């Protein structure tokens, strides 16, 4: 055999062996690089989704906080309205109590004067005195309950920022009214 043929055959065989070994390695390397690029792109997409989700969660929390503050404010305003209505009713009940006290004093005088003169007091006066005393006791209990409700409303108001703000504004208005 001619040495040139042998060299050609050896080079050809070596080339085929080299190609059969390196081609899969080159293909594997290229496939791995493409897989890595895909994976990095996927990580970037996941990071972007996570950032957007975080931003959405922050926005939702801020909206929820704002809604909570508004609800607290509405609740405080409702309590304020309730307190104002109760204060009008309380004033009316206090006036009724004052009138009952005055009537009791007057009926006691009438009954005492009748007894001092040796006359039996009118049964209607004695009945009216008993009814008025019962009503006075009832009014005193109602007013005590209203006072406790008012104190509880103030304690409840102090539990929220909106309530504390309302109470502070009330103090400022009172101070402005007394200093003006």
Image (cartoon, rainbow, N blue to C red):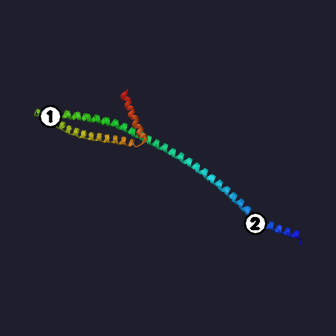
User: Which residue is found at the position 31% from the left and 40% from the top?
Assistant: 147
Q: Position of residue 94 (x, y in %)?
A: 29, 35
Q: Position of residue 166 (x, y in %)?
A: 41, 37
Asked if residue 36 lies left or right of residue 94, the reply is right
Front residue of 117/123: it is 117
Q: Residues within 10 Å of mark 1 (few under 14, many from 20)?
A: some
**Residue most extreme to the top:** 180
Identify the mark nearer the N-term, 1 or 2: 2
Q: Position of residue 119 (x, y in %)?
A: 11, 34
Query: For numbered disc 1, what is the local secondary structure?
Result: helix
Q: Verify CB contact (< 8 Å) between mark 1 and mark 2.
A: no
The CA span between labels 1 and 2 is 130 Å
Disc 2 marks which residue? 21
Q: Which mark is residue 112?
A: 1
Front residue of 176/41: it is 41
Looking at the image, is mark 1 or mark 2 nearer the viewer?
2
Please tell me whether residue 10 is drawn above or below residue 141 in the rendered image. below
Toward which corner of the image does residue 28 lie, by quadrant?
Answer: bottom right
User: Which residue is found at the position 22% from the left and 39% from the top?
Assistant: 133
Q: How many marks?
A: 2
- For the N terminus, the quadrant is bottom right
- For the C terminus, the quadrant is top left
Toward which corner of the image does residue 43 lie, by quadrant?
Answer: bottom right
Q: Position of residue 114 (x, y in %)?
A: 13, 33
User: Which residue is found at the position 30% from the left and 36% from the top?
Assistant: 93
User: Which residue is found at the position 80% from the left and 67% from the top?
Assistant: 14
Q: Which mark is residue 170?
A: none
Q: Residues within 10 Å of mark 2 (few under 14, many from 20)?
A: few
Query: For numbered disc 2, what is the local secondary structure?
Result: helix
**Residue most extreme to the bottom:** 1
Asked if residue 30 lies left or right of residue 51, the reply is right
């Amino acid at each position: 055999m001619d040495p040139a043929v042998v060299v050609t055959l050896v080079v050809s065989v070596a080339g085929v062996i080299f190609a059969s070994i390196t081609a899969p390695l080159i293909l594997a390397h290229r496939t791995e690089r493409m897989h890595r690029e895909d994976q990095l792109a996927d990580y970037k997409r996941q990071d972007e989704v996570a950032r957007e989700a975080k931003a959405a969660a922050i926005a939702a929390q801020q909206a929820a906080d704002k809604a909570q503050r508004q609800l607290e404010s509405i609740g405080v305003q409702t309590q304020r309205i309730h307190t104002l209505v109760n204060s009008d009713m309380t004033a009316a009940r206090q006036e009724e109590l004052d009138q009952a006290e005055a009537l009791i004093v007057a009926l006691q005088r009438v009954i005492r004067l009748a007894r001092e003169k040796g006359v039996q007091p009118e049964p209607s006066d004695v009945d009216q005195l008993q009814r008025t005393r019962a009503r006075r006791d009832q009014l005193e209990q109602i007013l005590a309950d209203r006072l406790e409700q008012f104190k509880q409303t103030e304690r409840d108001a102090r539990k929220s920022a909106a309530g504390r703000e309302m109470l502070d504004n009330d103090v400022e208005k009172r101070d402005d009214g007394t200093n003006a």
